[in-house]
Amino acid sequence: MSAETHELVVVGSGVAGLSAAVYAARADLEPVVLEGPEPGGQLTLTTEVENYLGFPEGIGGMELIQRGKEQAEAFGAEFVHATVESAALEDRPFALELSTGDTLRTRALIVATGASARWVGAENEDELMGYGLSTCATCDGAFHRGDDVLVIGGGDSAMEEALFLAKFADSVTVVHRRDELRASEIMARRALEHEQIEFRWNAELLEIHGSQDEGVTGATLVSHPDGHPTERLEESASRTDAESRAVEPRDGEEVEREEVDVGGIFYGVGHVPNTAFLEDTPVPLDEDGHLLTEDGMTTETAVPGVFGAGDVMDPKYRQAVTAAGTGSMAALDAEGWLDQEAAERLEASAPA
């Protein structure tokens, strides 16, 4: 990659990054978009998007992302398949060390790296994510009208998923590996008192049944009276035959398996913001790693020239349309900041 200094680099190619790229490219900023390890972000795992403005018949998540990329490229955005390993943001131009070994320099930076949903490691989750297995009830809950569904988790995220799904599903069962919730008192009470929400305590999801043609058709759950059953299964599997014979199981200590018929499974075990490359920079992050913006009402961060967009700075809404909105806001903020910086440079270089 050349040693030139770019006006703007967008890190991330989900809907927030693509929206920022479209707006920035139309402003002739010639943005470079770093696609990241999973180009397109979480939306590519969604088979059908029904709540994005302008698509009354719905649109596939991958198609929406591909259209956005083509739109950005048509206006002049350049896409590079790379991730940021580290960033030097103390001085300008900023310097980004890429996974390719190259160094990219830029006057302004939009961070739109999103947040990755935590998965639980159940068998077949890779194959069935987006085919009845989801990490977003708000996105996919309406597809499960009349279904029996599972929600995996015990924190606020899981309670929010369960409460939303109760509007559509015939039944919602929260599967939690302990016998008490981690959720806040108010969220726990709402879920526990809801007549359509049941709880499976000391249980975990081991395997998901179904196919991409049929979708999710069922699941294998494991349970143990003292909780964390999959850990106990792993411990048992790691013992030698001699060790297993030497251990006499006591009543209630066996891990039990159960097959259940369900039409959907939702992971509610939280999201991890993709901000590792910012941890040693002046850009402030909250305790969970989300990028903090000034006053919470702008895309600007405490570092002049660095802006945030999408789920990386939004732990609440996490919707495609809100991510696209903050992407366009970040591009407009970056354009205004670059114009002001250019005027200040010109004034500083003018003869006295």
Image (cartoon, grey):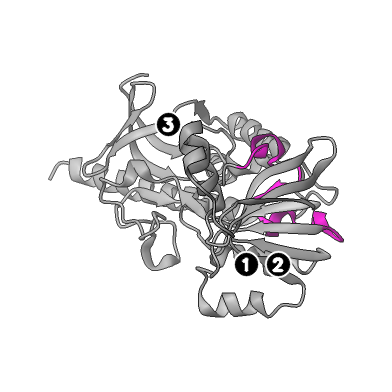
Q: Under tag 3, what secondary structure? A: loop
Query: In the rendered structure, which disc, 1 or 3, sits on the residue that comes first in sequence?
Result: 3
- Which residue is the extreme one toward the left? 352
Which residue in the structure is indicated by mark 2? 164
- Asked whether 29 or 93 is in front, the reply is 93
Query: In the rendered structure, which disc, 3 or 2, sits on the residue that comes first in sequence?
Result: 3
Query: Which mark is nearer the camera, 1 or 3?
Result: 1
Instruction: For marks 1 and 3, give the CA distance.
Output: 32 Å
Q: Residue at x 39, y 46 (%)?
A: 275
Q: Was residue 36 drawn as part of the magenta stretch in this picture?
A: no
Q: Under tag 2, what secondary structure? A: helix
- What range of the chain is rendered magenta? 122-147
For residue 160, which numbered disc appears in the image? 1
Amino acid found under the numbered disc labelled 2: Phe
Asked whether the beta carbons under mark 2 and mark 1 sit within 8 Å of each other, the answer is yes
Which residue in the structure is indicated by mark 3? 83
